[in-house]
Image (cartoon, rainbow, N blue to C red):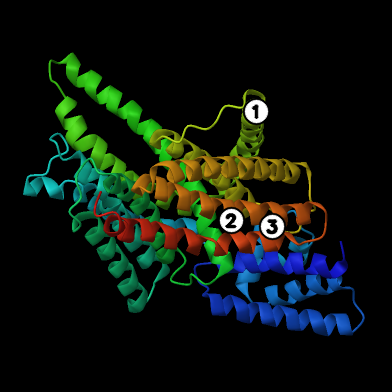
């Protein structure tokens, strides 16, 4: 690895930290980076090596800018901590978290109550209105979550307008079309609208700066951490539900109605916002947990996919392309992609290729082969029976995943062989989020019209 590559890796890591700070906009981080590079250039022209110039430039910026001090404080394993830190106290993150708590509670309460609003119009969870709630499930909690991030990031009116317009568009798509409860379009809307609206939340999370690769990667990291906290809250909620029903039953009261109509739905919607707040408030805890989970499950999924490919080759059995099977394979590929994305987001950009990177390459290649097999099966079924909403959606989704996995495998191979920087793989994944957004909105908005609301 060249010295220049080492320097670029150090600057990339420094920039990544700067762009995670709420106090900085993307343009601010770019200005600070230009200032840092200018100092490095001056020092290298005076005869210093690039790594020495970087250390001294960060030290001098640290004496001018508190953000550089925080960066050095967080990366305690690096030499330049000693060059920058004279022992100042930590930034008051706890105080900031306390200020945000009332706003989080308000947004969580709005999300919890939103799911009860339809009952005022005769639509109840306990009746035959399950399809309505399934189509609209993301519209109960995600607007409140986006509002929380919009407040936290201090976004401008223009971004707020975009967020509101996209949520209104999602509400129209879920409710204005004359969809039957048992139609394929209803199922596709139920699956794709939450993904589309989650990416709308991403716009609020990055403060409207969606063009920034680094901030999109921060959102990917947040998504992984949010899933972990949401799952933990779900497990805790299950225990609370069991105790609630058991204790009330002990005195002769049946709490099942309260649990099913209020505790579970309202608690789930509130947990969406609470989980996000926990990620923001407790990053130092979860950042130790999530990379460990990624490293545990990546080799397990790689072994599982390889075993499937071996079994497929040995038996010669074709892939059943019924709807449930297609959903299972797509879910499997999405999990693989999620493992890849979060591993990328948690990786040290300056680290050399290691064993875990090679395991990830195996996982990506295996997923690519399985995706190709599923595409062949879907194409054969469409050729025989024609297009339908489910088969067309499955075809498009697997093409989208195939393109991502194919180029990811190529970039990973180049990185493992030392021919490409890891940053190229990171940029590819963050920019591909726009493809996912485009596809999910296409399914939600266009598919019902294309297939006559079938």
Numbered badge on residue 307: 1
Pick whichever of labels 1 and 3 is earlier in the sequence: 3
Which secondary structure, mark 1?
A: helix
Residue 3: % across, % down? 87, 67
The residue depicted at 69 percent of the width and 51 percent of the height is: 409
10 Å neighbourhood of mark 1: few (<14), some, or many (≥20)? few
The residue depicted at 14 percent of the width and 50 percent of the height is: 117
- Observer-nearest of 195 and 254: 195
Residue 274: % across, % down? 36, 48
Asked whether disc 2 touches disc 3, contact meaning CB atoms under 8 Å apart, the reply is no
Quadrant hosting residue 213: bottom right
Residue 398: % across, % down? 51, 49
Residue beneath disc 2: 403
Which secondary structure, mark 3?
A: loop
Q: Residue 282, can we see it?
A: no
Q: Nearer the viewer, mark 2 or mark 3?
A: 2
Pick whichever of labels 2 and 1 is earlier in the sequence: 1
Structural distance between the alpha carbons of marks 1 and 3: 40 Å
């Amino acid at each position: 690895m060249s010295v220049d590559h080492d320097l670029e890796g150090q600057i990339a890591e420094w920039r990544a930290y700067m762009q995670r700070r709420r106090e900085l906009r993307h343009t601010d981080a770019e200005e600070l980076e230009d200032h840092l590079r200018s100092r490095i250039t001056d020092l290298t022209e005076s005869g210093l090596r690039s790594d020495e110039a970087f250390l001294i430039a960060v030290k001098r910026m640290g004496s001018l800018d508190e953000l550089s001090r925080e960066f050095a404080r967080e990366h305690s394993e690096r030499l330049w901590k000693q060059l920058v830190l004279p022992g100042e106290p930590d930034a008051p993150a706890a105080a900031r978290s306390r200020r945000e708590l009332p706003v989080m509670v308000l947004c969580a309460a709005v999300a919890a109550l939103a799911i009860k609003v339809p009952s005022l119009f005769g639509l109840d969870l306990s009746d035959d209105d399950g399809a309505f709630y399934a189509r609209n499930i993301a519209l109960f909690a995600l607007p409140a979550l986006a509002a929380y991030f919009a407040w936290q990031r201090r976004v401008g009116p223009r971004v707020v307008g975009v967020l509101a317009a996209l949520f209104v568009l999602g509400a129209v798509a879920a409710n204005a079309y004359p969809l039957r409860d048992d139609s394929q379009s209803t199922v596709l809307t139920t699956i794709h609208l939450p993904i589309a609206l989650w990416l709308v939340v991403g716009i609020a999370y990055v403060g409207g700066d969606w063009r920034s690769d680094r901030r999109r990667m921060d959102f990917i990291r947040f998504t992984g951490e949010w899933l972990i906290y949401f799952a933990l809250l779900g497990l805790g909620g299950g225990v609370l539900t069991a105790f609630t029903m058991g204790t009330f039953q002990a005195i002769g009261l049946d709490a099942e109605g309260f649990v099913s109509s209020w505790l579970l739905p309202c608690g789930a919607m509130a947990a969406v916002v609470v989980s996000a707040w926990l990620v923001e408030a407790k990053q130092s805890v979860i950042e130790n947990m999530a990379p460990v989970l990624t490293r545990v499950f990546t080799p397990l999924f790689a072994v599982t996919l390889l075993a499937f490919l071996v079994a497929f080759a040995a038996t010669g059995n074709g892939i059943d392309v019924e709807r449930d099977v297609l959903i299972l394979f797509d879910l499997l590929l999405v999990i693989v992609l999620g493992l890849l994305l979060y591993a990328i987001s948690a990786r040290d950009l300056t680290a050399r290729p290691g064993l875990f990177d090679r395991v990830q390459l195996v996982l990506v290649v295996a997923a690519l082969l399985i995706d190709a097999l599923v595409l062949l099966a879907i194409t054969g079924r469409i050729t025989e029976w024609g297009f339908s909403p489910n088969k067309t959606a499955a075809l498009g989704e697997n093409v989208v995943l195939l393109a991502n996995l194919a180029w990811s495998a190529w970039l990973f191979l180049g990185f493992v062989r030392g021919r490409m920087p890891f940053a190229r793989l990171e940029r590819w994944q963050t920019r591909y989020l726009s493809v996912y957004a485009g596809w999910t909105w296409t399914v939600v908005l266009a598919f019902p019209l294309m297939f006559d609301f079938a």
